[in-house]
Amino acid sequence: MTDTSARPDAGSTIPDRPTLEGLEARWDRVWSDAQVYAFDADTTREEVFSVDTPPPTASGSLHIGHVFGYSQADMIVRYQRMRGKNVFYPLGWDDNGLPTERRVQNYFGVRCDPSLPYDPDFTPPQEGGDNKSAKAANQLPISRRNFIELCERLTEIDEKSFEEVFRTLGLSVDWNHSYQTINARSRATSQRAFLENLAAGQAYQAEAPTMWDVTYRTAVAQAEQEDRERDGAYHRLGFTRADGSGEKVYIETTRPELLPACVALVAHPDDPRYQGLFGTTVISPLFGVEVPVHPHPLAQADKGAGIAMICTFGDANDVTWWRELELPTRSVIGRDGRFVADAPWITSPEGQERYAKLAGLTVFSAQKTVVEMAAETGDLVGEPKRITHPVKFYENGDKPLEFVTSRQWYLTNGGRDQSEDGLRRELIERGRQVTWHPAYMESRYRNWVEGLTGDWLISRQRFFGVPFPVWYAVGEDGEVAYDQVLTPEIADLPIDPTIDVPAGYTEEQRGRAGGFVADPDILDTWATSSLTPQLAGGWNEDPELFSKVYPMDLRPQGHDIIRTWLFATIVRSHLQQDSLPWKHASINGWILDPDRKKMSKSKGNVVTPIGLLHQHGSDGVRYWAGRARQGVDTAFDEGQMKIGRRLAIKILNASKFALGFGQAPADPAGRLAADPAAVTEALDRALLASLARVVDAATAAMDEMDYARALEVTEPFFWTFCDDYIELIKDRAHGSAGESGAASARAALAIALDVLLRLFAPVIVFATEEVWSWWREGSVHTQPWPEAAPLREAAAGEDASVLETLSDLVIVVRRIKSDAKVSQKTPILSLTLTVPAARAAQAEAGRADLMALGRVEALEIIGGEVEDAAASAVELGEPPVKQPRG
């Protein structure tokens, strides 16, 4: 789509002093008014290039990592647009989830208490605060509905500030197709997908041990967990054999506080030390509970004492042993992270008395108490052995995760499927079908899928998110029948089961015998954002649009969320549409701080982008992002941004010179900006021949979505164009060699400038658009990508190395004067240049231009047996006299 209205002042003159200042706001306004980046719905799927753009979490502020990744994606998108694709490039906002809730709590000084009634006239106690250390006790409790309204209010504010940054950055997204992950449209889409999964048997409930964050009191999925090294200790404890022998069996554990939850001991079946114990029982220290001893291959003979206690639950191995050995459940840690009041399986008076000392304690305090009691009774042998070991944390949490038994919703993802042709294998094959940029990222995806240990836990015990669209029947005895799931009609979505009522019931029956209760949980935020292709493409409400954009062409994202967002999206599309969600995945790296650590909000080492965009210009910041290769972690480097700013300024200034001889007529076909027949001089034709090579290389790179390589080949040519070619032909372009020589130089300048602007346009978006507006109609960003063939035709077979040879000689001539410490304007009365014999003819072809550049009055060029050009017999003239100012 070429919009000729995308100029602020058609027919404008070239400014006397081109500047980057103000370009971002001016061109964003022009692009928006002219709808330059709008998707044309009157299209076919073959004409479309669609993008599944990452929806940033609308909470707080963007950081430089966002600018980095989104700029790289935009470079790929802009290229596809210039290749004639009808680009579908939406941007969404990931509103729901824990980060938003935490920000609302700090910003408004409130916390959610679902037991409270809704207050339609509620006013928050503060607005604009950000006291992250404030305790929940100091926050005003409010109803769930009031809390959600504050979440919606704050995300709207954040989204506006985010959009301002992205517009300043020059993202060519279509703002007509923005979406939110929490609005009615997204809730309906997410709930429909869940209900279809439920009907297909892909979503199910289970009451089982679940990784639990005790601070936020919510379940945490495997993909949201991370290991952190923490101090710990091995405690050697003695269990007594129950055969009356009094013999001790010693175990070593880092979790002595879980002794009251012990249900068995386990050792490797081949360990000779414990062959006689298998099938017998032992009695736990302190609490006197008799437990069996089992063999199991997961037990490690070389770890600790080689025999371990199984507790419900200390770690993932405990869960596996508990399930496979069919052991009882004796949970002692509640959802608040404190020890529960009762442990009825402890029957001895001494054991009950000791457990009473643990009830209500945190895990840390309980461990200290158990160790003290074991030391007093002699059940603790020796001093604890200090260690450091990895401990599971929620990625946004600050306390270790615990296993808590709870009822949760799960979605099949192959994690429990070990069959050769099951879902796990199908999802691995889906990964192979994606074209990865860079290719090695596929192994990260495959490794994640192969390492899954369970299905996807999709329920969260939070408030701001997409509610599970289900209710449960309540029996006449008042017990909730979780196996009697009540669901709404698809046409009635979205629903909130805490407000809406299932068909056949009334509000008066809520929570009563014979009535119903709502599922109180919300979907994991990834369970919504994993549907971004469906959300953006209108799967639920606009099937025609969906058919034109899905499967999408590109998913750009960071490598750190391959295991979460990318994998989850493949899972959902595989289950919902039996297809890949997109064809290509472009993976960007992290931004590293000066200490080579990942920048993140949690580490407090992030840099916000708006100041950098104003200081270095958006083109300068985009240049820094464009120099980084896909998938590679990149250091935050303002030096690169400064280089990018200089490049953008040079584009303005070089273009001012190139266009200073009058505007060349635009070729309606968009092939060349001037009559190629006018290019008659060898140097000018060599320029176009060399530029054809650049176009070939840049096109090949961009076809592979390698924006960094395209910039890598374009930028050096541009500097040769500015520093060597323009300086060589400057006098000729002004007419020093007659009209034919001038016309040739001017035509070559116009053609080269036109092509270079289009080559740079995906990266340097504002400076190229500004120059384009000085002499051409429409937007440079909707022009065809340049082709090499017309340039080669205009070069008329000229060897591109003519330009290379003369560029080398320019260096020699300039060095003569710099070594003599005289001005470059100093004339050279006579000069002999010896060049490699094979390049003598090329040097002769540019003799006149070289003499004009170096102010050489007499030049002899000798072809000799040398590797590099060199000067001899140099006679310098008198330096020019400086004219006094004024």
Image (cartoon, rainbow, N blue to C red):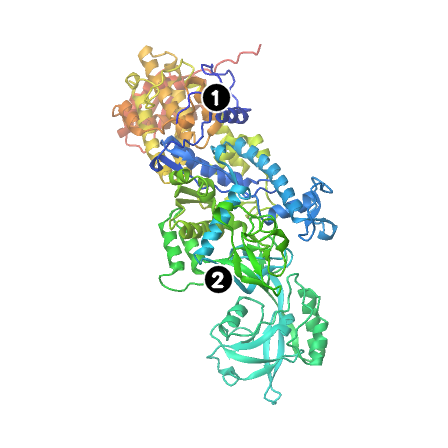
* Residue 61 vertical position relative to residue 357 in the rendered view, above or below: above
Q: Which mark is residue 59?
A: none
Dot 1 crowding, Cα within 10 Å, few <14, some 14–19, many 20+: some
Quadrant in the picture for residue 103? top right
Q: Residue 302's x, y, as percent?
A: 51, 74
* Element at label 1: loop
Q: Residue 72's x, y, as percent?
A: 46, 38
Q: Which residue is mark 2?
A: 454
Pair 1/2: label in front? 2
Q: Which mark is residue 822?
A: 1
Dot 2 crowding, Cα within 10 Å, few <14, some 14–19, many 20+: some
* Element at label 2: loop
- Is residue 424 visible in the rendered image? The answer is yes
Q: Dots 1 and 2: beta carbons under 8 Å? A: no
Mark 2 is on which residue type?
Answer: Gly
Label 1 – label 2 distance at C-alpha: 75 Å
Mark 1 is on which residue type?
Answer: Val
Q: Residue 121's x, y, as percent?
A: 71, 40
Classify the position of the C terminus by image quarter: top right
Q: Residue 204's x, y, as percent?
A: 49, 59
